């Protein structure tokens, strides 16, 4: 485990880079390349699709490491006037997820953020109440080699 010590994490999103250990104590050394990184953070769904789920050494939960805003949510856009399609798509909507993602996106918009800014946030509905936690981080985008 990389808990409580500085670590270099290989991962694309700026938000996750900003949350390096020790902020994410569940990070575990995984596939490293020539000693450049101590761990990599990859999407569990992607690893499962590639039949690599058995390689997962830790899953970062909500209280360990915040994801990028709306991470994992599927969005479908339709024409404003298309009522028939709105009914079809409406049947797919999960109201609690819609509420959570709307909250997360409002947080990002209020900060004028985008997919390249180190802003994380996650909302969920718990016992009928919306719970939100957000993070604005500073990222050093340099690669320090040992």
Image (spheres, helix red, strand yellow):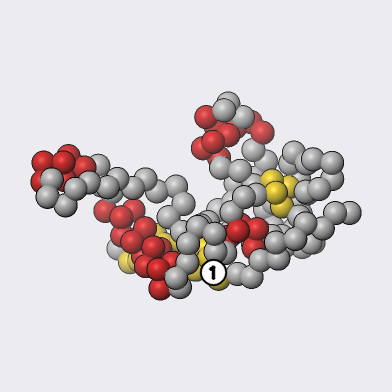
Q: Quadrant of residue 3?
A: bottom right
Would residue 66 be seen by someone viewing this image from the given angle?
no
| Along the line of sight, the residue nearer the viewer: 12 or 4 | 12
Q: Give the residue drawn at x 71%, y 52%.
A: 9
Q: Residue furthest top?
A: 51
> Percent x, y for residue 65?
58, 58
Q: Could you say where residue 18 lies in the image, as x and y percent from the top left?
A: 64, 63
Tell me if 62 is positioned left or right of 58 in this view: left
Q: From the top left corner, tell me how far across and down residue 43 is, in percent.
A: 56, 42
80 sits to left or right of 9: left
Give the residue displayed 34% in from the left and 53% down from the top: 97
The relative height of residue 85 versus residue 144 in the rendered view (above or below) is above
Looking at the rendered image, the quarter that the C terminus falls into is: bottom right
Image coordinates of residue 114 in percent, x first then y, are 47, 62
Callout 1 environment at 10 Å: few (<14), some (14 to 19), or many (20+)? some
Q: Disc 1 marks which residue?
A: 135
Quarter where residue 135 is shown = bottom right
Q: Is residue 142 visible?
A: yes
Image point (77%, 57%), residue name: 143
Q: Is 4 or 20 nearer to us in this picture?
A: 20
Query: Residue drawn at (27%, 47%), measured in percent from left and top?
Result: 77
Q: How many numbered dots are placed on residues in this image?
A: 1
């Amino acid at each position: 485990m990389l808990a409580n010590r500085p670590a270099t994490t290989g991962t694309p999103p700026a938000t996750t880079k900003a949350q390096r250990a020790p902020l994410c104590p569940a990070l575990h050394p995984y596939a490293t390349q020539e000693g450049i990184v101590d761990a990599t953070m990859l999407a569990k769904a992607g690893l499962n699709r590639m039949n690599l789920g058995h390689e997962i050494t830790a899953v970062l939960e909500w209280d360990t490491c915040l994801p990028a805003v709306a991470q994992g949510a599927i969005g479908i856009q339709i024409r404003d006037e298309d009522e028939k399609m709105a009914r079809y798509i409406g049947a797919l909507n999960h109201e609690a997820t819609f509420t959570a993602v709307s909250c997360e996106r409002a947080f990002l918009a209020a900060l004028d953020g985008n997919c390249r800014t180190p802003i994380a946030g996650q909302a969920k509905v718990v016992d009928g109440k919306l719970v939100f936690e957000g993070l604005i981080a500073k990222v050093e985008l340099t690669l320090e080699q040992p």
